[in-house]
Image (cartoon, rainbow, N blue to C red):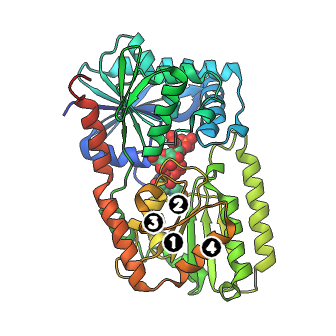
């Protein structure tokens, strides 16, 4: 296979022990470890000039080329347009859009800069795999610079329905530029349908199941649900099951049952709804009072983007209120932590719990849901309670308890059912989900996408 050049805004730290809390970085790193390749992107720091200094780090077969963003580019590209306009709209929260012309200009400027960085590194046969909403127009800029490589985009977040996509200023220009890619990959069939619908209805493109054609240019589309490496996770969870952190967790629980959730602190994850669902469980089913603890790990994310700070305040208020209402001298119902943990520790926490709770209001995939399942022991697995609005629900609906996070009472019923579920049913559900995770693992994700990128259908 050709050399792989990956481009994403967030690049995972490849140094052992450093925590990376976003699914894109976690998934791409694991996928790239097996084949090797080049990974280019932002180094996470704000400097005086975007793209300079550009540094190269080698780690095994992965070579990382990263650079800073200037304050202006960080503010306009990352904070302003990517996370203040595209992120809310793609997560069906047009009400949170904060549009400014200078942010859109910054978004385009940084996309041009990334195209120039790619041009410096790319060899003619490289397969260029670009990730996420930060780079909708990047292929167009690469083409303008004369790059002839195969260019693929994988969108990690949902694609909204046409009326919502249309709330994004300049939506038509963005979508047209997106069609400069050779292949656009999406997490679910629903996301792909929404992209096709928009291009047909609003751009006048023609579309078949696997391609969109506009002005004679064909863009292939595909559904590639990102996966995990279940065996690696099983191994991590098993290996760390008696680690210092797990011992601390268990001693705090004092043999109580554990419901666990792990998310970046983001309004798309349904954290307030989840706290209310847990409260309803305590309210309506007294036998769980003092008998179940809920641990919420929520590392802060995008703290300087509109909407995130107020969410944090609301969560503090809500968890504080619930705890003040129910806490006993020897029991605190919600342990809410604004910090991150490394993956081995998280996987061992998952294994030590009875319920994994994912309540996203919209989520591209939600790797935590898949990791939760993979980390369980086969003999005594925990139960996954999963929002129907996370991409993961498309694959795990048979084994998880599927909920609507807006329906507090059905959430609390699902929590009760999960806590009361007999071992035989838990094992059966776990097995069903593990089969899916093994079939659609991270390697399958990478190989299917890259093979479709490398081998266009005849005539494509
Ligand atoms: O880079 P940040 O701004 O700190 O945000 C972290 C990442 O969040 C998003 O992750 C998504 O990708 C996951 C893997 O495919 C998927 O499971 C999840 O549903 C998505 O929300 C974002 O898409 C990434 O670009 C960010 O790096
Ligand atoms: O303290 C933490 C919290 C999360 N994660 C990882 O961050 C990723 C989150 O990905 P997900 O797809 O669930 O959501 P995203 O944050 O990308 O929207 C998962 O691999 C988690 O294991 C982590 O390593 N440490």
Q: Which residue is mark 2?
A: 341
Q: Are marks 1 and 3 in contact (CB under 8 Å)?
A: no
Residue at image x 70%, y 39%? 304
Name the front one of labels 4 and 1: 4
Cα–Cα span, label 2 and label 3: 15 Å
Query: Does 58 sit above or below residue 352?
Result: above
Q: Percent x, y for residue 324?
A: 80, 74
Q: Earlier in the sequence, mark 3 or mark 4?
A: 4
SS under mark 2: loop
Q: Percent x, y for residue 62?
A: 31, 39
Q: Which residue is mark 4?
A: 294
In this rendering, does residue 36 appear at all?
Answer: yes
Q: Are marks 2 and 4 in contact (CB under 8 Å)?
A: no
User: Image check: 99 left or right of 105?
Assistant: right
Q: Which mark is residue 245?
A: 1
SS under mark 1: helix
Q: Are marks 3 and 4 in contact (CB under 8 Å)?
A: no
Number of other residues with Cα within 10 Å of mark 3, as a class: few under 14, some 14 to 19, many 20 or more: many
Q: Earlier in the sequence, mark 2 or mark 3?
A: 2
Q: Which residue is mark 3?
A: 372
Q: Are marks 1 and 2 in contact (CB under 8 Å)?
A: yes
Query: Does 248 sit above or below residue 129?
Result: below
Cα–Cα span, label 4 and label 1: 16 Å
Label 2 CB less than 8 angstroms from ligand 2: yes
SS under mark 4: strand
Cα–Cα span, label 1 and label 3: 17 Å
Q: Earlier in the sequence, mark 4 or mark 1?
A: 1
Label 4 CB less than 8 angstroms from ligand 2: no
Name the front one of labels 2 and 3: 3
Q: Earlier in the sequence, mark 1 or mark 3?
A: 1
Number of other residues with Cα within 10 Å of mark 4, as a class: few under 14, some 14 to 19, many 20 or more: many
């Amino acid at each position: 296979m050709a050399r792989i050049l990956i481009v994403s805004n967030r690049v995972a730290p490849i140094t052992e022990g450093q925590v990376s809390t976003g699914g894109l970085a976690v998934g791409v790193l694991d996928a790239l470890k097996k084949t090797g390749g080049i990974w280019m992107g932002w180094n996470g720091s704000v400097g005086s000039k975007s793209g300079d200094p550009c540094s190269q780090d080698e780690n095994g077969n992965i070579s990382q080329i990263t650079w800073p963003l200037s304050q202006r580019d960080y503010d306009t590209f990352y904070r302003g347009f990517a996370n203040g306009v595209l992120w809310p709209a793609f997560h069906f929260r047009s009400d949170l859009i904060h549009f400014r012309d200078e942010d859109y200009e910054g978004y385009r400027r940084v996309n041009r800069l990334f195209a120039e960085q790619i041009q410096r590194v790319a060899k003619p046969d490289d397969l260029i795999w670009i990730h996420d909403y930060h780079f909708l127009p990047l292929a167009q800029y690469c083409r303008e610079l004369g790059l002839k490589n195969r260019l693929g985009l994988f969108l990690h977040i949902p694609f909204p329905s046409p009326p919502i996509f249309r709330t994004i200023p300049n939506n038509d220009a963005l979508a047209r530029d997106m069609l400069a890619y050779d292949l656009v990959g999406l997490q679910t069939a629903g996301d792909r349908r929404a992209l096709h619908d928009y291009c047909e209805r609003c751009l006048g493109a023609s579309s078949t199941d696997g391609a969109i054609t506009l002005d004679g240019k064909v863009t292939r589309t595909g559904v590639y649900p990102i996966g995990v490496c279940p065996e690696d996770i099983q191994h991590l969870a098993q290996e760390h099951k008696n680690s210092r952190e797990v011992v601390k967790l268990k001693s705090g629980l004092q043999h109580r049952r554990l419901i666990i959730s792990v998310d970046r602190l983001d309004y798309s994850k349904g954290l307030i709804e989840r706290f209310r669902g847990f409260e309803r469980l305590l309210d309506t089913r007294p036998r769980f009072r003092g008998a179940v603890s809920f641990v919420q790990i929520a590392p802060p994310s995008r703290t300087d983007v509109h909407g995130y700070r107020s969410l944090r305040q609301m969560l503090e208020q809500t968890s504080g209120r619930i705890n003040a209402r129910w806490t006993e001298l020897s029991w605190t119902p919600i342990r809410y932590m604004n910090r991150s943990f490394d993956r081995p520790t998280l996987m061992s926490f998952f294994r030590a719990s009875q319920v994994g709770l994912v309540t996203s209001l919209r989520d591209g995939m939600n790797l935590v849901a898949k990791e939760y399942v993979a980390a369980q022991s086969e003999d005594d697995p925990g139960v996954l309670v999963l929002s129907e609005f996370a991409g993961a629900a498309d694959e795990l609906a048979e084994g998880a308890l599927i909920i609507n996070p807006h329906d507090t009472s059905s959430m609390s019923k699902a929590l009760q059912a999960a806590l009361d579920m007999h071992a035989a049913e838990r094992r059966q559900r776990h097995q069903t989900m593990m089969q899916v995770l093994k079939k659609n693992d991270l390697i399958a994700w990478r190989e299917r996408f890259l093979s479709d990128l490398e081998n266009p259908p005849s005539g494509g």
